[in-house]
Amino acid sequence: MKQTIGFIGMGNMAQAIAEGFVRSGMVSPEKLRAYAPHQDKLRQNAERIGFIPCASASELTASSDICIMCCKPYQIEEVLKEISALLPGRALLSVAAGWDFDRYRPLLPSGTRFQFIMPNTPAMTGDGVLLFEAAHSLEAEERMQIMELFGCLGLVRELPSHLMGIGGTITGCGPAFVDMMMEAFADAAVKYGISRPLAYELVSQMVLGSARLQAVTGKHPGQLKDEVCSPGGTTILGVEALEKHGLRAACLEAIQAVMRGER
């Protein structure tokens, strides 16, 4: 990627994307810019990742071909007021939840090319999911190049606008729910004598291997579960316990709580 890419905001998600770009070799660090209001922390991340820190959002926008809006959703309108005059002729990507094409469109000046993307934190290691909203105003070739770029971060898929919410909930919030499950299994391992570091290592590899097995074989998760459960064996006892304690219902309810916006 020869174009310069600027990050407006440098929180966990922006760091995951920036580190993923650099790790993959798709973007050299000197092609990356970033702005965040906490300048000390920004400089620390710049030293670690290699991007060039900027003193303001307008400075970043003026020096970037592609801008990625990574600030908090409630900050977007104020940021746009500062940078809107600089956006025509540039591509603006946004990873802010809830800010899709229709929400941005009335706020963007004519000539701004826009794409809403929902990433997740495993993008840092190239194992992420990157959801591109079908509605956009990028040029066709430009969009293909950007999708190829984000492909270095993981699986890229397009979704219609009305499915971006549920898609982003599953892929964006889901890692936190899986992390809770991993922590619980590690606690069980520690309870029975395995050291904490080894417990996390074993559980992480188990989850990684199980996910990869399903992805590679394409088998239904229920079938893979059945293949582990021998008649009269031990695994089915654990499956029974999970059913009794409502694992499936809890997973469904977690997603529904996010979709309802409960607090």
Image (spheres, rainbow, N blue to C red):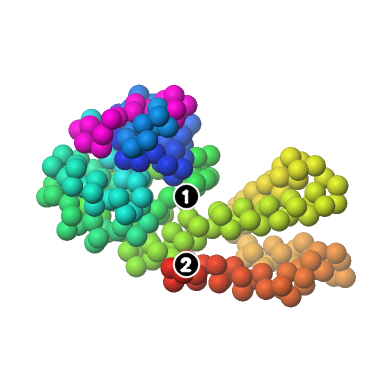
Q: Residue at x 30, y 50 (%)?
A: 75
Q: Residue at x 74, y 50 (%)?
A: 186
The circle drawn on residue 215 is none
Rendered image quadrant of residue 60: top left
> Can residue 197 be seen?
yes
| Local secondary structure at mark 2 | loop
Rendered image quadrant of residue 142: top left
Q: Which residues are magenta?
A: 44-62
Q: Position of residue 174 (x, y in %)?
A: 54, 58
Q: Is residue 152 above or below residue 74?
A: above
Q: Position of residue 35 (x, y in %)?
A: 32, 35
Rendered image quadrant of residue 217: bottom right
Q: Nearer the viewer, residue 230 or 42?
A: 42
Tell me how far mark 1 sits from mark 2, CA to CA: 22 Å
Q: Is residue 151 above or below residue 243?
A: above
Residue type, numbered disc 1: Asn
Mark whose residue sits in front, 1 or 2: 2
Is residue 216 found left or right of 191 in the rendered image? left
Say whether residue 198 is magenta. no
Residue type, numbered disc 2: Arg
The circle drawn on residue 263 is 2
Q: Main secondary structure of the magenta part?
A: helix
Pointer 1: what residue? Answer: 120
Q: Position of residue 33 (x, y in %)?
A: 32, 31
Q: Is residue 194 above or below residue 253?
A: above
Q: Residue at x 37, y 56 (%)?
A: 97
Q: Residue at x 77, y 72 (%)?
A: 240
Q: Position of residue 233 (x, y in %)?
A: 86, 66
**For mark 2, does the 10 Å Cα neighbourhood hold few (<14), some (14 to 19), or many (20 or more) residues?**
few
Tag 1 near tag 2, CB within 8 Å: no
| Local secondary structure at mark 1 | loop
